[in-house]
Image (tube, coloured by chain):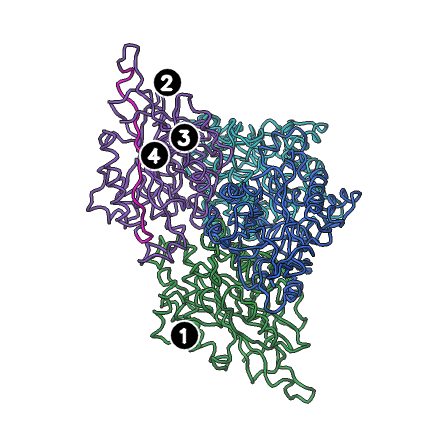
Chain colours: A purple, B cyan, C green, D blue
Amino acid sequence: MSGIAIHKFTTAHPGDVSALKSLPESTKPEDLLAVIGKTEGNGCVNDFTRMLSSTVWDPHLEASGGISVFSGGTEGVLSPHVSLVVKEDDYLNEDGSKMYNEGLVAKVGGTRDFEPWEMGTAIQAKVTADTIKKLISEVEVEPDDVHMVLVKCPLLTTAKVVASAKECVTTDTYKSMGYSRLATAVGIALALGEVTEDGIDDALESYGQRGWSSRASCSSGAELENCHIVILASSKKASNPYRAVHGYMADAIDLNVLLELTSKIPRGAKRVQIFVKAEPSTDGVVRGKRHTMMTDSDIQGTRHARAAVGGLVAGVWGETDVYVSGGAEGQGPMGGGSVCVVYKV
Amino acid sequence: MSGIAIHKFTTAHPGDVSALKSLPESTKPEDLLAVIGKTEGNGCVNDFTRMLSSTVWDPHLEASGGISVFSGGTEGVLSPHVSLVVKEDDYLNEDGSKMYNEGLVAKVGGTRDFEPWEMGTAIQAKVTADTIKKLISEVEVEPDDVHMVLVKCPLLTTAKVVASAKECVTTDTYKSMGYSRLATAVGIALALGEVTEDGIDDALESYGQRGWSSRASCSSGAELENCHIVILASSKKASNPYRAVHGYMADAIDLNVLLELTSKIPRGAKRVQIFVKAEPSTDGVVRGKRHTMMTDSDIQGTRHARAAVGGLVAGVWGETDVYVSGGAEGQGPMGGGSVCVVYKV
Amino acid sequence: MSGIAIHKFTTAHPGDVSALKSLPESTKPEDLLAVIGKTEGNGCVNDFTRMLSSTVWDPHLEASGGISVFSGGTEGVLSPHVSLVVKEDDYLNEDGSKMYNEGLVAKVGGTRDFEPWEMGTAIQAKVTADTIKKLISEVEVEPDDVHMVLVKCPLLTTAKVVASAKECVTTDTYKSMGYSRLATAVGIALALGEVTEDGIDDALESYGQRGWSSRASCSSGAELENCHIVILASSKKASNPYRAVHGYMADAIDLNVLLELTSKIPRGAKRVQIFVKAEPSTDGVVRGKRHTMMTDSDIQGTRHARAAVGGLVAGVWGETDVYVSGGAEGQGPMGGGSVCVVYKV
Amino acid sequence: MSGIAIHKFTTAHPGDVSALKSLPESTKPEDLLAVIGKTEGNGCVNDFTRMLSSTVWDPHLEASGGISVFSGGTEGVLSPHVSLVVKEDDYLNEDGSKMYNEGLVAKVGGTRDFEPWEMGTAIQAKVTADTIKKLISEVEVEPDDVHMVLVKCPLLTTAKVVASAKECVTTDTYKSMGYSRLATAVGIALALGEVTEDGIDDALESYGQRGWSSRASCSSGAELENCHIVILASSKKASNPYRAVHGYMADAIDLNVLLELTSKIPRGAKRVQIFVKAEPSTDGVVRGKRHTMMTDSDIQGTRHARAAVGGLVAGVWGETDVYVSGGAEGQGPMGGGSVCVVYKV
């Protein structure tokens, strides 16, 4: 069981680790469980800002065995930032009793590396699900206590496709990002009991329309070959002031659910971070009206979606260093996306 | 005095004039005052979707002497559409008395063509102001009755810069779009009494920070050499159910003003259209946090701003065929933009 | 049999038809067989410069029953232009005998419209082949006399995919451009006897690697639903000074073949135009070294290829208004592309 | 005096330092003078591939006090790679006499950091010139012996402009790259005696048209605040088989000068590397015909130029890992660019 705190800092560029200096003095190197960041690349295949960020951050995660998850793309008003998830001792009263009767806990881990031909398939889904189940049991919570499973997953490059021993799910490098996110999300849904093992193929074939999780947040990148996993959950065994609620946007302009979820933050509580997934709806419309996100050959659809949903989320949240990640296959209903709100009472 | 109706239709592509067939049968060709559209180009220098739209629409505006204003860029969730402003007779009761004691009126017109070296200068501002003043007087309203002055203004291409008899305000074609919008907005502010003639130079030099209008909505394009002007105003002399309110976003995530303005729409009234200007703040931050809109060499800043503000506006409005236009120099405070809401009681 | 002349003019923008005024005075409206142009769009799905050009040019092609083929994309040094193919009477000596014992002839035509689910399939290939065979027989030449079959073919938009009665070859709008070019090229190869009817499926499945034509030049666009075809051939029955040679680039930096083909132009002859197809090699390398054209999520691969091959071709040709078109599936070997050189003795 | 060898290797991604393992075994860490690389970013303001490459390479340059110069942008066929400049002892015959009576030498160094308001000004030019003069004298050659001065120079970001104590040369971050390259190039020209100190202002004001160097190769980036300098020269005091020739392309399609310079490589000699600068001509034409590089708001002009000139250079050189860098202000005539060919006899 790992009680945690979450500290958020803006970054000056993708190579900026100055956030480390802003952590509470009591934080030790072995406490740094995860770095969850938004970097200012295109969020697509050739986004090397993620690689730069993981190159400079990963040495600082060695002591803790922690992981980094960088999601590229700060289109529109979004502000590059990092959220540092750090272990924190239970809050105790002077008499040694627990100050709170619940708290937020986190667990991080990684799957094995995937072969190119496994990416985007049921194999990736199952291996990811197994790892998540193990992590959930280690952190001593139930699947229902989980608010968000945030995963950084791999993608296919031209070099990997050409070198692959078996046929890959696609030869299109940009599309491989979506397939990898989808397989990961289906794995999360399996681990959380939202789809059954029998339903995996159908979930994959329907591109997440028949099998998804509102607690999945997946982002793919060329900078890794396995899945990096962060699990956020509520625990009655912990004692800290961090709380979370989750839900999902039904479409890309679902202001209501955002207002509803944020209204659950008690008056006086401090907003910590909001994690949202976004995507262009694959039927080409939002509430019946044509969008141009998928016929734009200059800007990828995920970039459009991040920019638009980012504008809406930042408007609701009142600040721009929110975590909005593009490509929501299986992470909420088609055209919508998962939402997780973290606050501090 | 021209009482009007506004009809909005989505378009299938920039060459689509099928909206004409959806107008009320009573509409005659000479009633079509203006076509105000969003097209799916990049909204920048080489956005030929605007030229395509004006090529196919302008023949339909000849009978009325009407004008077209196409604003390029439907980034994010924005949906390409046209708003047709048509003359409509006063609504009368059976006894011939006026059904309403007010109504929305419109007036359209154009300035003379501008020389390349005039674009973006005080000359453009003054000529535009003179034309607007004349149009306002012709439509028999006061400057305070005006809700929005929507203008399509020219830009500089490399060919124009090279051919210019005198030095131009810039040699950068993308930047010329901003200067032209700025000069136009300052002209609007002058016509509406928001800046004085003495203040023009200061307004231009401060890039609109010291001299702007919350009722200006300017968009520049390569498809014209003069300014196309549409004025929307309330008039006690008209009798129709169209109403408007206006205001401005203080920054790019100003959700509050959008909620406030839309809350003025009476219960039961029909939302007609919302017109919003958006821009990347030139100080590089939104509410103190860095944005990347102006250091992104892949996507122009106005595209980012349209996508983000478009997402927010569409969320509030509940539909995606809203008019969000990029580049708000002098059209609201720095980083924010003008807002005009039209509804039908 | 239609002896022809080819006149080339640069354009100021995609809506520019001023070239019409520069044609020889003797040219009648019914002589204008084809307009083959390069426009300055992105050459991809949302390239509306092609639609703008066909909108302004097509009325001028009605008298002749002629066709337009606009290929988007003038990346790098390429200069937007049009090549006008006009019928021209045989050149005769004063005694009425033929001045030349050969000449260039052309024939234009179109297939029927294709359903969304036919695009990119063997159906499109066969229908196109049938039309080409008919056109070749009508112009009274043999397949071996043909130097180039230039075709504008349709693509899939999100709207078409969603509306399709049957499953389409892809749901990815950008990819549909490649499939449509491929099916067209295989149709050309079939018509010219370069693949057999039995080989069509293999040619399509191998993405043109086992079945291609060095005389195919295909370009896809959203502005049409059928194939527009222009055939250029040598004929002993004609008498005019236009000549052509053809070949193919083996890869994207094949300077040698360009020097070799242009060296066939006799001293003193006038260069008329060079038509070249270009593409990113799908194995991700050029002469064994990695390229980044297919992992770049900011710029589509065909844009990269046009820019690079355009630079090379313009260097060899000595002028920049050359016809370099992107996407060479089945139009030359993988990674290379067809080349056709036209000159005037 | 530092006799050198140059070894070229392709890279798998911008974080790839595997080239180190491919160096001759005799190479010691303190021999690595310079890493001159092309990375696959956009080559513009937000190109963090350069920062990633310098982050991973710079630790390997500490022992030698060497420098890295990464030029972003491998548009078109260009292949990401690094050229490692390593110190090498004189080649001697068995009797201890020199094997060659000349050889290639190199010297590297850096200027002081520049303030934001100094960038792109005469101050930057003069400081750079002073450093170059010092380096030339240290390597014991004359200015006429120099074949290339390759410099990585800083640029302005929005943050720097906002924080600057004095007004900067521009507020446009992309434009600042050009001004910085220009000032650097003028500094090189001053150091090499191609402009006089009196001519600096005129060279800057004319944007390099009246004052340029065909031996300058400058590239700007956000990853440094000073200038990194590499000087390549011929020396009679050295004894090694490396040779160089230099010249300049008069425009972006100047195939002739490339053929001429490469024809100077003796039969049997090995091509080592070609260094070329490229830019869109600011008058908007190439040999009288309009280009669209500067009116394209989707792709920056330097990207277009690199792609096109890269295609031409790769065609001539016969391989794609050539060094073509965009933005040739003051580095060759307007629209053209410097060329340096290195080979090994």
Mark in the foreground, 4 or 2: 4
Check contact, mark 4 vs mark 3: CB within 8 A. Answer: no
Give the amino acid type for the residue marked by disc 4 in the picture: Gly
Horizontal and vertical percent position of residue A248: 32, 34
Cα separation between marks 3 and 2: 23 Å
Image height of C35 relative to B62, above or below: below
Left or right of residue A335: residue D169: right
**How many residues crowd around disc 4 within 10 Å: few (fewer than 14), some, or many (20 or more)?**
some
Check contact, mark 3 vs mark 2: CB within 8 A. Answer: no
For residue C19, say whether it is visible.
Answer: no
Instruction: Name the subunit of mark 3.
Output: A
Check contact, mark 1 vs mark 3: CB within 8 A. Answer: no
**How many residues crowd around disc 2 within 10 Å: few (fewer than 14), some, or many (20 or more)?**
few
Q: Quadrant of residue C236?
A: bottom right
Residue denoted by label 2: A267
Give the amino acid type for the residue marked by disc 1 in the picture: Leu
In the foreground, A109 or B321: A109
Residue denoted by label 3: A83
| Label 4 in the same subunit as label 2 | yes
Work out which quarter of the rendered image holds the N terminus of chain C and state it: bottom right
Cα separation between marks 1 and 4: 61 Å
Residue denoted by label 4: A65
- SS at mark 2? loop
For residue B341, say whether it is visible.
Answer: yes
In magenta, the rendered stretch is: A98-117
Cα separation between marks 4 and 3: 17 Å
Q: Indicate whether residue D91 is drawn in magenta.
A: no
**How many residues crowd around disc 1 within 10 Å: few (fewer than 14), some, or many (20 or more)?**
many
Mark in the foreground, 3 or 2: 3
Instruction: Name the subunit of mark 4.
Output: A
